[in-house]
Image (cartoon, rainbow, N blue to C red):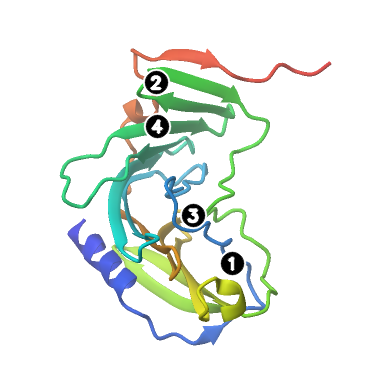
Amino acid sequence: MRQLRVWLVTLLLCSLQFTVLRAQEAPHPPDYPGVGVHIPGVFVTPVAGTPFSGTVEIVSKEVLPDGSTRTQQTLNHIARNSAGVIYNERRQLMPPAVRGEPLLLSAHIYDPQTRLSTFLEPRTHLARQTLLRQAPKNVENNAPQTPAPVSRRPNETITDLGTQTVAGLQLHGTRKERVVPASLSGTGKMITITDEYWLSVELDVYLIVRHNDPRTGEQTIGIVDIRRSEPDPVTFQIPAQYKIVDETPAEQP
């Protein structure tokens, strides 16, 4: 999907000049947690009827205490089948010079019909399973089905960036800008924290998330190489060499 990759890069690097403010209208995404070691990546909603798979590219530019910037990147594979079963990965952040796929740290499979959640641990070859009482929620980052209420905080502006069509998918953009006064920023200067989200309503997934805080750095998360066909069923299966461990809490009397 070369066209998709080009468009995503364009969307991430260009400052789109839209000025329609909707701070008092529709709900908007929650605040991004900021640059850190564990990046939440993309939350794939477990909804049926819209299968797809893709690769998530993550670039982290962290501002270090000495003022220098450390750049790391990784990729995760994600998928959702027609039944709404989801698959997501977390891989190790690596320097840009390192080639090849980063080390797989963990993978998550969730079936909304059975509410069975499985975390795969490659290091120990354990498949930790839990029967959830409700669907999992991504409280740290971008969950389209659970948007935060309209913000009424001072010094915050929410801008509707309009829509862009990328490889047949219509994306709707939202930019949140929060001004931190010099007295509270810890830098002696006024700073602006910027979060940008591009949602595919059709897939019910944020294809692009971009966070920038001058104090800590910048993270860009983007889905590339999207395939709209049914994923390989093997994606959602526990590998044969894994030991299944049931971690569902016992029912209280």
Mark 2 vs 1, N-terminal side: 1
Q: Say which amino acid is labelled 4.
A: Ser
Q: Residue 204 carries which label?
A: 3
Q: In this view, does 234 lie to the left or right of 184?
A: left
Q: Distance between the residues labelled 1 and 3?
A: 14 Å
Relative to 123, say whether 62 is above or below: below
Q: How far apart are marks 2 and 4 (CA)?
A: 12 Å
Mark 3 surroundings within 10 Å by alpha-carbon count, few (fewer than 14), some (14 through 19), many (20 or more): some
- Answer whether labels 2 and 1 touch (C-beta < 8 Å): no
Q: How far apart are marks 2 and 3 (CA)?
A: 26 Å
- Give how far across and how far down residue 183 sits, in percent: 61, 78
Q: Distance between the residues labelled 3 and 4?
A: 23 Å
Q: Which mark is residue 28?
A: 1
Q: Which mark is residue 238?
A: 2
Q: Which of 123 and 182 is in front in this view?
A: 182
The reply to whether residue 225 is visible in this rendering is no
Q: Residue at x 40, y 32 (%)?
A: 107
Relative to 237, say whether 189 is above or below: below
